[in-house]
Amino acid sequence: MTMLPVKDLQERSDRHPKPSDIKFQYGTAGFRTLGKTLDSVLFRVGVLAALRSKKLDGKTIGVMVTASHNPEPDNGVKLVDPRGEMLESSWEAHATALANAPNSVAFVAAVDELVKATKIDLSIPARVVYARDTRPTGPQLIAALKDGLEAIKAEYRDAGVTTTPVLHYLVRTINTKGTKDSYGKDTEEGYLTKLSDAFKKLLAGKPTPPPLLIDCANGVGALMAERFKGYLGDIFNINLVNADLHTPGALNNSCGADFVKVNQKLPPSITLQPGQRACSLDGDADRLMYYYADERGQFHMLDGDKITTLVASYIVELVKASGLDEQIKVGVIQTAYANGSSTKYLSERLPVKCVPTGVKHLHHAAEQYDVGVYFEANGHGTVLFSPAAQELISSHKPSTALTNLKNIIDVINQTVGDALSDAFLVEAILAQKSFSGVEWDSLYCDLPNRLVKVVVSDRNAFKTEDAERRLVSPPSLQAKVDELVRKYEGGRSFVRPSGTEDVVRVYAEAATRAEADELAFSVAGLVYDEAGGDPSQRPKEFL
Ligand code: 16G
Ligand code: MG
């Protein structure tokens, strides 16, 4: 029977001591905090990833080192399961337990316990593929990860500096290589070729779209977008801004998808000509925010909900035109953050489901449909085609619509939200439909909305139900929120604890901008008064 390499694990773990004052938590997007505190976590994640691989019969597990849209000093790490999806939730607790073992002896004991509890056969080989974004703490954290992988004798592959969606793609392609479910070539080049070929086919014969301005958040998306240029030829031009990977502190600073979504304005580094369209990626290129300037030069945002609407409507059209609408049902998954107007528009046409925030919830719900379209309002999303739907599409009688549908499938990265793939998807649909930003935007009109953060003494005191749309704790707070909401016609507001920051978030929408702001700040004030802390942190009345 193969035993744990206890001595090696312990000795190497001693080189990566856990900071005694930090409690780590594997949250919505893995571990995420100040990069310089994460050394022990990375070492332990290396061991955990290997155990997960052994548990899944030697399938390759992914490890991505990134903190997405967070500021540059932060970093983080998340695990990717064999089909390119997020780590199964039951293992999040194992990750948290291993990360918090106070010392090496306790860590090895926790590993041993996990092996026994989950009945892992240690003789099975472990395989891991890892990558990182461009953060300065990345290389050192990768070194700690490798030490963990070597301590448990895992085989590993370094995917280098790349985007989160590329790492997800690699995991899926490695694990399906040579099978009937093969998802493409298991290299970055395979990814670039697959997406760009499909995109070029969708654009063929259409007028060349105007060059697309891409704000790369000064992150790793800039590298990937630059690589795509070589694959797109002159059929589609992209111009990169905020592609500076060398200036310290530039990452996600006053740019990127999160900046645009939260502030509902252009990054100061960008000016748009009337009619011009552009988009922003986040720091690891898995979120996408579109926008355009109207003929008066005014900014309009096209967020994840607008992307859902465009994509879902187009896929429904293609399925129908292919004569597959009886067999293939398209559904949409949203979260409470989806703009009320988008939910209204979509649910008049398609089944729409609301789930809690976080990709894993949306992804899981999307798997229940033949075609599941999911985007969070913040721009993270993709489309899933069930194996049966793909089978039907691949064997159905040929037509232009069916060819387009096949190319749409190939331009999409089904493993996870992928900003560049999503941008190509959007551009392909706009080209197919001869839509400008204005026409896309006119599908429905967003309700004004506002998102506010509240710093409270204990965010765990906040518990929600009904896909985070209602609070169950602190008791009686929901009734007070309801009372405030009732004062605003068409008003809606909800309160939820953040899964990635130590804050509570308040969202509100109403018929006018002033009312949405007023409602958001009234609810935030209420939350603060109920569970407050430092008076200087009380939400300011208006922006
Ligand atoms: C993470 C999630 C994202 C979610 C966000 C919410 C993943 C890969 N990412 O970034 O889906 O929208 O957290 O953050 O699951 P919050 O809980 O802090 O509001
Ligand atoms: Mg991200």
Image (cartoon, rainbow, N blue to C red):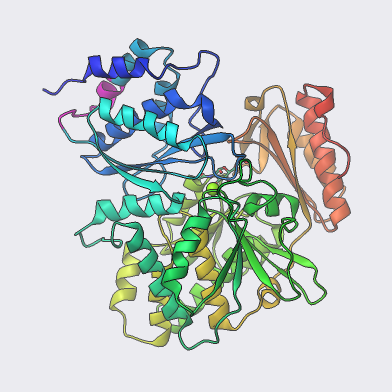
Q: Is residue 443 left or right of residue 425?
A: right
Quarter of the rendered image showing ligand 1: top right
Measured along the vertical axis of the image, is residue 481 above or below residue 182? above
Return the residue nearer the eye: 234 or 198: 234
Q: Position of residue 39 (x, y in %)?
A: 45, 25
Q: Where, quadrant-wise, is the N terminus in this rendering?
A: top left
Q: Within the image, what quadrant is residue 295 found in?
A: bottom right
Magenta residues span 112-123
- Note whether residue 2 is visible: yes
Q: Residue at x 63, y 53 (%)?
A: 256
Q: Position of residue 384 (x, y in %)?
A: 42, 61
In the rendered image, residue 467 lying in the magenta stretch gets the answer: no
Measured along the vertical axis of the image, is residue 286 above or below residue 228? above
- Note whether residue 386 is visible: no
Measured along the vertical axis of the image, is residue 153 above or below residue 267? above
Return the residue nearer the eye: 229 or 65: 229
Q: Residue at x 59, y 75 (%)?
A: 211
Q: Within the image, what quadrant is residue 184 found in?
A: bottom left
Q: Where, quadrant-wise, is the C terminus in this rendering?
A: top right
Q: Within the image, what quadrant is residue 15 found in?
A: top left
Q: Position of residue 136 (x, y in %)?
A: 52, 37
Q: Position of residue 294 (x, y in %)?
A: 77, 73
| Number of numbered discs visible in the structure rendering | 0
Q: Residue at x 19, y 59 (%)?
A: 178
Return the residue nearer the eye: 175 or 256: 256
Q: Residue at x 17, y 34 (%)?
A: 124
